[in-house]
Amino acid sequence: MVDAYVGIDIGTSGMKAVLIDREGHVHEATATYRPVVIEGGGLEHNPDTWWQALGEIFRKLSQYGGKTHRVKALGLSGMIPAVLLLDSQKKPLRHAILQNDSRSEAYVRSWPFTVDEVVQRVGSRPSVQHVGPRVRWLWDREPDVMARVRHLVGSAEYLAGLLSGVWRLDANWALESGLWDYHTQSWVPEYCEAARINGAWFAPVVPPGSIVGELIHDPTGEASCFRNAPVVLVGADHVAAALGSGLRSVGDCLIKLGSAGDILVCDDAWRPSPQWFMDYHLVPGQYLPNGCMATSGALLPWVLEFVNASHLSWQELDQLAATVPPGSDGLILLPYFAGEKSPIFDGQARGTILGLTLSHRAPHLYRAILEGVAYAFRHHVDVFEEAQVRIRRLVIGDGGATSALWVRIIADVLGKPVAPLRQRAASAVGTALAAAEAVDRLGGVLGEQIIQYRDLVEPDERSATIYEQGYRVFRDLYKATQALFPRLASLSVRDP
């Protein structure tokens, strides 16, 4: 029997998993599902789909080596902070509200505590990701449901509880809830009171990567290789992705080009800021100042439909866009199509295109999107480095890392060499490595075996000069249009 470690990541549109054995072999499995999209900015999941997807994952991974592998640990990570309300029997009372749900925005603006105070206590400013405004919003709309709440958990916590019978909360879920005081390591009473949250709803908080129990409930009833495996609550998917991308030293930085965009930097100090989020790294003694952009790769399917180019492959679009010079012939795009989180935290911001002429075509718009997302990452890099969060090594991962053009543009816009990851399931890989570390102290050893990068991409000096000018226009464009976005909202009134 070969010992193996499993990492499972609960995503917005599906579940990804990897099985890594001690010989360095990696097997992947996926299960897809759809979020429930609700008009007005709502994004939810039926938690039953998580359990069903978990059963599908178990069956697939068992087929890879159920007779030859023994799972030494099962790690779980997911998007945070998802909000799942449970009754006294730990049964869901409604769908889970996902981190990108923006329906509580008005409650964020009226949150009765100053930005500076909240940042210093919990590490990030009030936003639609914070749990307090969301729960207060629910009290006003679903009081009958809220009256029955006895437990409040996230996605990974929910599955870990079902599998092991032991209920715990990941420390990064607590931090990003906006209710957990970093300094006292306790819930903030006045924040909970403002949200009408009972502190007894929360399970004990544990560090990321903690063993919470053993697997006693199998969603399939037949995956024997998982039997009695320790269940490890790894927690935040982006934190797991940092580990799964090889970020272990101060100054290591990951850019995630998924549907949304993430940027995380390893640091050795607690540096809260109103311009980013703070999380604990899975590497002891380190932190992850990080930014999250509402849209990144999600803009690519949009532009395909917008220019009626759905028949083209991504590779064909890259080839067409590569014929357009850096700067897209004077086209600048703000990628704020769903508002923006960090670093501007403006839920009313909107996608904006400046510089259109009759000579611009679909490839120009496509390239302008790639460049606009790169400019937004550059904005994050600037605010990090202005606050002495130094970036010494840059890695690019997730689906967008397969685009050689996009990687090239990011290197040129940032003026820094970048290393694209070969693996796409960085969150699942990091979750498995954290599980291996928790039970056998093998996370680092296995990580060195399986984490691989493509050739380093160095910035082109001439393109970098052009992009420096484009970036300045990008920053000035938001400043010039910021006051117009609330006025635009009044124009989007629909007939009942």
Image: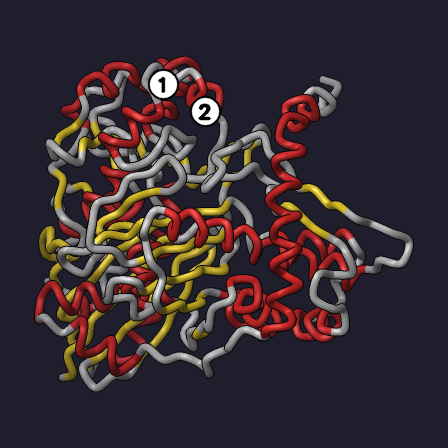
Q: Position of residue 276 (x, y in %)?
A: 38, 42
Q: CA distance from mark 2 to mark 1?
A: 8 Å
Above or below for 196 versus 318: above
Farthest residue toward the right? 358
Whether residue 59 appears in this view of the structure is no
- How many numbered marks appear? 2
Q: Residue at x 67, y 24 (%)?
A: 489
As rendered, which of 475 and 121 lies closer to the eye?
475
Q: Residue at x 72, y 25 (%)?
A: 492
94 vs 411, left or right, is: left
Q: Residue at x 76, y 68 (%)?
A: 324
Give the amino acid at mark 2: Ser
Mark 2 — residue?
104
* Residue density around tag 1, few if under 14, some if 14–19, many if 20 or more, within 10 Å: many
Q: Residue 334 is drawn in which quadrant? A: top right
Above or below for 208 versus 95: below
Residues marked 2 and 1 touching at CB (< 8 Å): yes
**Which of the two discs, 2 and 1, labels the residue nearer the N terminus?**
2
Whether residue 225 appears in this view of the structure is yes
Q: How is the image coloured?
A: secondary structure
Q: Of the numbered discs in the image, which one, if any, rests on residue 223? A: none
Q: Residue 205 is drawn in which quadrant? A: top left
Q: Position of residue 355 (x, y in %)?
A: 79, 48
Above or below for 436 versus 36: below
Image quarter where the C terminus lies is top right
Give the amino acid at mark 1: Arg
363 vs 258, left or right, is: right
* Residue density around tag 2, few if under 14, some if 14–19, many if 20 or more, within 10 Å: many
> Which secondary structure, mark 2?
loop
Mark 1 — residue?
136
Q: Position of residue 477 (x, y in %)?
A: 66, 41
400 vs 437, left or right, is: right
